Amino acid sequence: MRILIAEDDALLREGLALLLRGEGFEVSAVSDAAQFLTVFEETAPDAAVLDVRMPPTFTNEGLRAAIEVRKLRPAFPSWSFPRTSRIATPVNCWQEAPAGSGTCSRNGSAR
């Protein structure tokens, strides 16, 4: 299984990649949403893990990238997490989010 990680924090990105590789997954890891979309098209991963807030504005670039991927592959499994608190909270609102909205609440509903 191929997993694509998009995370701007190098320690977290490489640590997660190392853990997943240790479990036998093929892993590609990038540091921003633009790279994520490029590598997604080049490698056709089976799943993705994305940080919500990435460069350049650190607002919702990862979430917007995940929504773009869902337009291309509606059933694509992805997990996005905001690191706004000590505990990462999963966000899953891809089916509800209107095109281009790019924001979700912590309970998983689109805003």
Image: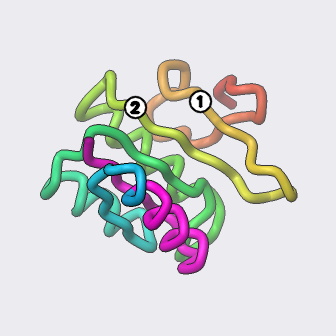
Labelled disc at residue 18? none
Looking at the picture, tell me which residue is in the foreground, 50 or 54. Answer: 50
Q: Is residue 44 left or right of residue 92?
A: left
Q: Who's the residue at 52% across and 40% down the image?
A: 79
Residue 104 x %, y %: 66, 36
Q: Is residue 73 left or right of residue 18?
A: left
Q: How many marks?
A: 2
The kind of residue tagged 2 is Pro
Identify residue for label 2.
77
Secondary structure at numbered mark 2: loop
The kind of residue tagged 1 is Asn
| Quarter of the figure with the N terminus | top left
Identify residue for label 1.
92
Residue 5 x %, y %: 42, 58
Going from N to C along the chain, the mark reached first, 1 or 2, is: 2
Q: Is residue 75 left or right of residue 42?
A: right
Residues rendered magenta in the picture: 1-20
Label 1 environment density (alpha carbons within 10 Å; few <14, some 14–19, many ≥20): many
106 is higher (above) or lower (below) than 3: above
